[in-house]
Image: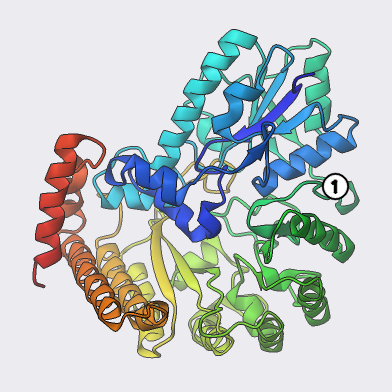
Amino acid sequence: MGATVVLTADRGSFTDYGGSSVMGYVACMPSRLVPQAFVKVFFTPRVKSRGGKAVVAPYALRKVEASLLRAGFSEDEVYVTPPDELKHVVSPQTKVLGLTVHDPLGLEPVSMKLSMLFGGGPTWTAELFRELGEEVMKLKAKYGFKVIVGGPGVWQLEKERPVWIDTLFYGHGELDFPPLVKSVLEGRTPPPAVKGRKPKVSEIPTIVNPARLGEVQVTRGCPRGCWFCSITPDTFLSIPLEDVQKEIEVNKRGGAERVEFVTDDILLYGSSKLRVNHDAVVKLFQTTMSAGMDGAWFPHISIGAVMDSPKTVKSMAEISRYDRVRAAAPVVGLETGSEKILRKYMRAKAFPWSIGDWGDLVIKATAVMNESYIYPCYTMTIGYPEENDQDVEESIRLVESIIDHGFKTYIFPLPVVPMGNTMIRDNPFPSLKKLPARYWDLLYISWRWNLKVIRDSIPTFTGGLGNKVAQRLVQYMIDRVFDSIEWVFKELRDTKGESSLKYSTLNLNNTVGVLKSIYWLTRLTFKKL
């Protein structure tokens, strides 16, 4: 008997990124700038499968799989399949193909920024979705199944909806996806759009097969209510510790040695009204490490929560054994230094303190994190309709204060994107000409600091090389490349972004383009600042 329901995603999402999720950001680059072989071999490698079923899979697909199994489907009917295996799994018995998408058109903030900075064009995230679409269209024409697409990037498909999609599924799938699938199996035509209801904690099943990178969800949603954030519409909840334990064991049986918590703010686990629950967070980390895991990492933390309970930050870092080599680098919303922008778009960002305290909170929270080997990747949102150079100047002053303190942190000023499920969805999309002129100064200052922080870490990362000559050579090569990267950002600053247009013809995915690129990169490498 063949698979009745097949769940998959494009290659940019259905991968373990070679063991490091940071590698996935390369797929946010314009596709012409990163050779296809590099992307598919190093940055989005294939996931292993057995009999057409993925050994590990994106956490979102594992949740959908668990929801279907709880609703009465059998494991013989439901396949979570890597995109490269679809043609071997889909058959006349297949009635539904479910896809999860994250950045199908390359419109997420990081993708938008990198596309703007390097001359435009489709990103690899968009290209990999296009490739999957071509395969799905062929298989659908042959077998006639229905295609249901959900996930955080589904909003991007509203205006450029591929003809092969039957239903766009918004929201969570635990309650409403299984009934939708059953209706298709009963011969009913699925509606063009479905809004999934928000489940209660008790209605969220635990995964039954391993997720990539040892992913385990511990919170869902964020109660701060920032207008630009796609998480804001969600109801905040914490996953019971016993469910977290079950999922850790599932991943452990699949070979996971570490845990990557899925959360939008690790310090809000078990919290009430945005106040840190120290005991709940500490118990979460203790329980995880006592399960025999090598470490526990997290993708997000917030400045307000760090300052609400510095002792919790210290405790969870000690429990996870963070140190200079085993450091955490979560994404943290720095957003802006402008009180005007903060008050309009993110009034609860500093809670339980006031917006007027934001600058001081940032400095104090960064110090707290650095003391516990947590090196924040600060993201900033720039380009609101009423934002002017004075607002950006205030952001520059905040960034310069971080730099003056010598903190180990990374700062990424991103164009604010009006994602379809946010409170700013009707705002215009960012462009070179619409960004405040001072944005380019902020970008250069931030990246010059980022490169210095990375440079300072090179001896740590190359110290394991036994050959001292090779170690010095690698360090020299990296240093020269970073000189070149800094020059790129300096030129962007000096031309207010116009220099990005010269990269629009650079192409590493054809023979002529490779030769041209080698020449360009050679000049870039040896150009003196």
- Nearer to the camera, 398 or 512: 512
Check disc 1 and report the residue beneath it: 205
Q: Amino acid at mark 1?
A: Pro
Q: Indicate the quadrant where residue 522 lies.
A: bottom left
The quarter of the rendered structure image containing the C terminus is bottom left
Left or right, residue 81 beside residue 468: right
The residue positioned farthest toward the front in the image shown: 467
> Can residue 431 be seen in this snapshot?
no
State the residue at coordinates (77%, 31%).
177
State whether residue 384 is above or below residue 97. below
State whether residue 344 is above or below residue 55. below
- Nearer to the camera, 367 or 80: 80
Q: Indicate the quadrant where residue 301 lies.
A: bottom right
The quarter of the rendered structure image containing the N terminus is top right
Q: How many marks?
A: 1
Q: Position of residue 405 (x, y in %)?
A: 40, 90
